[in-house]
Amino acid sequence: MNTKKNISVCFTADQFEKYADGKSTVVVVDVLRATSVISTAFMQGVQVIIPVQNLDEALEYKGKEGCIVAAERNAKPIEGFDYGNSPFHYINADVAGKTLVLTTTNGTKAIYYAKEHKVLTASYINIEAVAQHLIEEHNDVIILCSGWKGVFNLEDPIFAGSLAKLLLETGSYESNCDSLFASMQLLKSADGNLFTYLSDSSHRKRLKSLNMEDDTRFCLSPPVKSDIIPILKDGKLVVL
Ligand code: MLT
């Protein structure tokens, strides 16, 4: 009989050092929008995604054969880059086989903070595939919410609640993490309608102010699902 594995939820990238144990599988989520973008880009045929921490590092790849450079700060695209951070950049676009160099306000930072662990990225696009992989792997899990500039956001913990629910339902996991229980309470409160529930959330309002509500709708209720699981290998995200 397998012992139950532990799940914990870390609410912001900046808190990760308090959860890091060097052995858990870390699932990074930035559902609005970085990890949803990562799932979409891989679905559309991008071969490799290089998450980088700053704009200058990303610009070193600008113009390189087969490279797309994408940057977002404060939800806005950055001048001089090929793309911002919308999933729609990659749909019906010539991205198959390309390398995407990506830097965002929070999501790529969370990936960096967790790099000493096995790191997967998740979104509502690949949540079922990620859950199935974790169940088969049977390891402790840390769900790392990216948050917003070091503070709590609503959407990532709700996603954490969705993923934790799928894992706990198997009976193969346990948790003594209040952040996880809070995440599951938030999920219950959302009652299946995340878009409405998040009407007053800071990031949904931020995206709405930039006329990006379609991005929010897509990321919270994606029209398609994917079984692609991005995993971090030598600083690059590749398909598991
Ligand atoms: C982030 O990484 O902070 C988010 O993806 C921001 C965004 O793209 O809206």
Image (cartoon, rainbow, N blue to C red):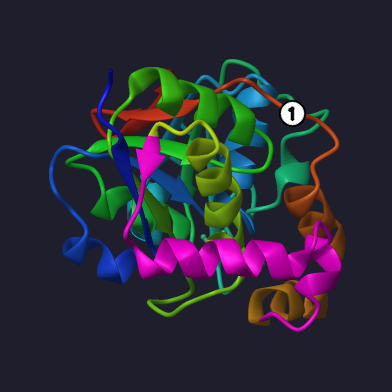
Tell me if residue 80 comes above or below residue 147 in the rendering: above
- Assign ligand 1 to one image quadrant: bottom right
Quarter of the image for residue 106 reads: bottom left
Image location (x, y in percent) of residue 166: 57, 38
- Looking at the image, the residue that sits furthest to the left is 22
Q: Relative to residue 60, is residue 192 drawn left or right?
A: right
Quadrant placement of the C terminus:
top left
Q: What residue type is labelled 1?
A: Lys
- Magenta part of the chain: 173-201
Image location (x, y in percent) of residue 183: 53, 64
Q: Residue at x 54, y 74 (%)?
A: 153
Q: Which residue is drawn at 68% across and 24% down?
A: 226
Q: Relative to residue 136, is residue 84 drawn left or right?
A: right
Q: Relative to residue 78, is residue 87 drawn left or right?
A: right
Tell me if residue 63 comes above or below residue 85 in the rendering: above
Image location (x, y in percent) of residue 96: 65, 18
Q: Residue at x 72, y 35 (%)?
A: 90
Q: Tell me if residue 68 can be seen.
A: yes
**Front position in the image: 236 or 60:** 236
